[in-house]
Amino acid sequence: MPDHEYLLVSITTTSSEEAERIAEALVQERLAACVNIVPAITSIYRWQGEVHRDSEVLLIAKSRPELFDPLAARVKELHSYEVPEIIALPIVAGSKAYLNWIDESVQGEIGDVPAMNLEDIKRINQLFAEFYPYLARQIANAYGREDGLALEIGPYSPGISIELTKLCPGLKVILGDSSAEVLSYLEERAAETSLGERIEVKELDKFNLPFAAATFDLVIFRGGLFFWEGQAQILRESYRVLKTGGVAIIGGGFGAEAPNELIEAKAAEIRELNQRLGKRTLSEAELSDILGQAGLTACTEVERRHGLWLTIRK
């Protein structure tokens, strides 16, 4: 077995209540497969020049290396310590059945939905061609600018971005996905345009975006709520890479102003393709829970006309 394929992450907390809150968030958001809670440990440590002795509660999380950064970021969000202990140790060997279960329980396997068929994705993007102008106008109105740097995530791009550049002549766009097959498709689509240096394709992990905080003015993720687990982490990462004053538009649908007759003409085939691609529906309670987990309820507007789109402002 390759080294560092799986991790044990050690986290100390102040109380059982804090430990349970963090453990539940990590498991619910698929950042860890399991978190053990070890009560009543004694820690002796140096802090701000003095030696302290405190009772703490230890968490031991089982996860994967590619999830360590978002796991650590989530712990910091929930933790009361200024400098919490978040230490990862490699699992060098383990029961095959147990390690397979870790794979099945965290985002690294389930979140990426490997069963997606590229030909189905291409077809659904073709069917949406007539809707992209409506979606681009909706996003341009929410964005309120004609320049800046945008990121469009996922396999259901770049139709919106191509239309958006017509409305925003100073806008540059980065397109990205984790699949080599999808990246090749995005590069082909980008090459068909006359956008030149205004559009770029990069490999990325939607759950752990490879960009510094405050990089983008606009983030777009069509399908980001419906085709992957770990939606709260997708929202948090999209928010993290936004500049202050930036906007993230995440969701799906035809566009608030799309005409009903156009929707009716396309809806049946689109619905069938979405089902094949694994689209999920979200209840009001599930959406509220996702926004609460992401900590973005207060800065999010919900648009439900002909779809479900979140507008998140930073």
Image: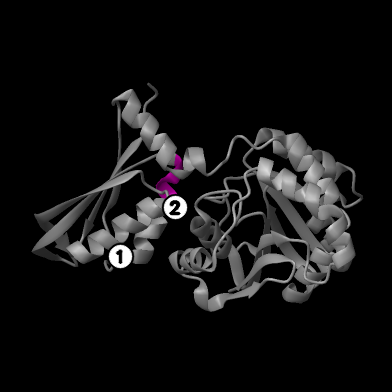
Residue 296, percent across and down? 51, 71
Residue at the spot x=41%, y=57% of the render?
Answer: 73
Residue at the spot x=82%, y=63% of the render?
Answer: 164
Give the quadrant of residue 67: top left
Q: Is residue 22 left or right of residue 39?
A: right
The residue where tag 1 is placed is 79
Vertical relation: 104 (above or below) 28: above
Q: Secondary structure at mark 2?
A: helix
Magenta stretch: residue 68 in it?
yes
Residue 96, percent across and down? 34, 24
The residue where tag 2 is placed is 70
Is residue 156 at least partly visible in the picture?
A: no
Q: Main secondary structure of the magenta part?
A: helix
Residue at far top of view: 1
Q: Secondary structure at mark 1?
A: loop
Residue 120, percent across and down? 75, 39
Scheme by which the image is coloured: one colour
Tell me which segment is drawn in magenta. Answer: 66-70
Q: Is residue 218 left or right of residue 45?
A: right
Number of numbered markers: 2
Disc 2 marks which amino acid? Pro
Residue 116, percent across and down? 65, 37
Q: Quadrant of the N terminus?
A: top left
Which mark is on residue 198? none
